[in-house]
Image (cartoon, rainbow, N blue to C red):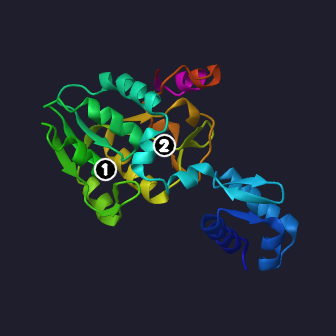
Amino acid sequence: MAAKDRIQAIKQMVANDKKVTVSNLSSIFQVTEETIRRDLEKLEDEGFLTRTYGGAVLNSAVLADNIHFYKRAKSFYEEKQIIARNTLPLIKNKTTMAADSSSTVMELLKLLKDRNDLTLLTNSAEAFHELAQSDINLVSTGGELNKNTLSLQGRITKEIISRYHVDIMVMSCKGLDMASGALDSNEAEAEIKKTMIRQATEVALLVDHSKFDRKAFVRLVDFSHIHYLITNKTPGDEWIAFCDKNNIQLVY
């Protein structure tokens, strides 16, 4: 078996069982334990798993994708509200905007309910429920419903997004790494966000303090595409300098 096929198979096992051991994987794939350790190290670098003594466990960010939207919405709730308030000044009069299906962005959308001058393109089913009685012009991306994330996904979703252009796209992610950019743990969600980014004049990334210097499995976008980074408290000096160097407006 080729190395890339073995690593893919290991990923599937970790996703299914939540944990694996080096000795068991060595026996299954008929390779040395040292080879398995290198495979696990690669997957850890990608943010998919965390190595433990004698094995590895599924990364908590990947596990979070299996947690229902309403449970995730309660996590770091106060921080999300602060981030939402910090983002409000970016939403100008008569703005056209795209929004992902994250619980962080949802807190921003709640604050926009009384606006009557906005057009919102989103793949968030929860956004339509929350804003159904508002005067915001809502545009659905269509697609298949992920019942855990309450988001619309798939080929149709990307095709519909590609028909539009918006002033600003607001999104969140699972992790930020200076070298790798914004990172996510769900490939289907990441593809939708990438499509929205391409159709936006500006991109605002909304993340709480726990996401800094945190890796996740899927590379979402590099920082050259991010115009605003909004968080809930002052980040470290390295991040302040990094944003300044990369012409990213840091809001906290």
Q: Dot 1: what SS?
A: loop
Q: Quadrant of residue 30?
A: bottom right
Is 184 colored magenta in this rendering? Answer: no
Q: Name the amino acid, label 1.
A: Ser
Residue range (magenta): 241-250
Left or right of 237? Residue 104 is: left
Percent of width and height locating residue 200:
32, 41
Left or right of 30? Residue 86 is: left
- Quadrant of the frame with the N terminus: bottom right
Q: Is residue 102 above or below residue 203?
A: below
Q: Nearer the viewer, mark 2 or mark 1?
A: 1
Would you say residue 121 is visible in this rendering? no
Would you say the residues marked 2 and 1 are in contact, meaning their CB atoms lie under 8 Å apart?
Answer: no
Left or right of 222? Residue 139 is: left
Q: Dot 2: what SS?
A: loop
Depth order, front residue of 150/213: 150
Q: Residues within 10 Å of mark 2 (few under 14, many from 20)?
A: many
Q: Earlier in the sequence, mark 2 or mark 1?
A: 1
Q: Residue at x 65, y 67 (%)?
A: 17
Q: Name the amino acid, label 2.
A: Cys
Q: Is residue 93 above or below residue 156?
A: above
Q: Residue at x 80, y 72 (%)?
A: 24
Residue 173 badge? 2
How far apart, in angstroms, are the residues tagged by discs 2 and 1? Answer: 15 Å
Q: Residue at x 78, y 72 (%)?
A: 25
Percent of width and height locating residue 113:
20, 33
Residue behind mark 1: 124
